Image: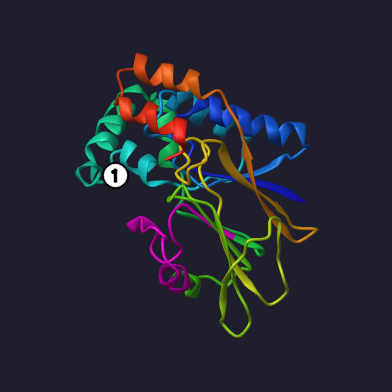
Amino acid sequence: MRIGIFSDIHGNFEALEAVLKYFKDNHIYKYICLGDIVGYGPNPNECVEAVKGLKCPVVLGNHDYVAIGKGDVSLFNVTARNAIEWTQKQLTRENLDFLRTLPFIYRTKQLIAVHSTPREPERWEYVLTMDAALQNMEYYTEPVCFIGHSHAPFFLELDPEGKPQLIRDNPMIIKDKYRYMVNVGSVGQPRDNNPKSAFALYDTTQKTVTLLRVPYDIAITQEKIIKAELPIQLAQRLQNGF
């Protein structure tokens, strides 16, 4: 079985459409969304409705959490705060209700999916260092943990003796008795100096994970951001992928 795993759409409908088109063109019909459907971008309702339509597992992201009034908006920087306050006013009651149903974690025998970290998902930690990754790998027993949140994709492998290694091979092979953490990157606001939408493909039969990128029409999204009078920085950063 092949599973498309994606995260951090952030109201960027053009980017989401490009990723979903890739899935359709490649006959991938199982998905997992790692949250942050909304925030920053100009199409929160369209993105929520598209994800709802997939009828797939979805976990809660920190921007989704604040959008439904459960987080502390004062913890966001000024740009993010302005964007989420705008987003709260745009979201329909039905889409807010959908976001309220989302769990922090989704698990199967083969994987765990969470927006931020498996240790304390509601604290919205960033996995930016090897130490942070290894500490969080103590909080799950599944072979692979898929995360988002930092918008920067990576593969991390932990061998049976507990030795970690960042994996450069793509696809990455899932080995028996090894454990893994995979950041799938961001669909709608990449931050690794690559403006193309990022996501992952998990092949449970072949035991591989592939990090993928697709282009989308950034100019359309930028025009929508400007028209909505969202912070101009949100349009500018999409061009450079940061």
Residue under the point 43% across and 50% down = 149
* Magenta highlight range: 112-135
The residue indicated by pointer 1 is 70
Q: Name the secondary structure under disc 1.
A: loop
Colour scheme of the rendered structure: rainbow
Residue under the point 61% across and 42% down = 56
Residue 126 located left or right of residue 23:
left
Q: Nearer the viewer, residue 50 or 229?
A: 229
Q: Position of residue 133 (x, y in %)?
A: 46, 68
- Judge whether 217 appears above or below 22 on screen: above
Residue under the point 41% across and 61% down = 128
- Judge whether 75 appears above or below 157 on screen: above
Q: Position of residue 158 (x, y in %)?
A: 59, 74
Q: Position of residue 113 (x, y in %)?
A: 54, 56
Q: Nearer the viewer, residue 62 or 226?
A: 226
What type is the residue that disc 1 sits on? Answer: Lys
- Judge whether 230 appears above or below 242 on screen: above
Q: Position of residue 202 (x, y in %)?
A: 69, 53
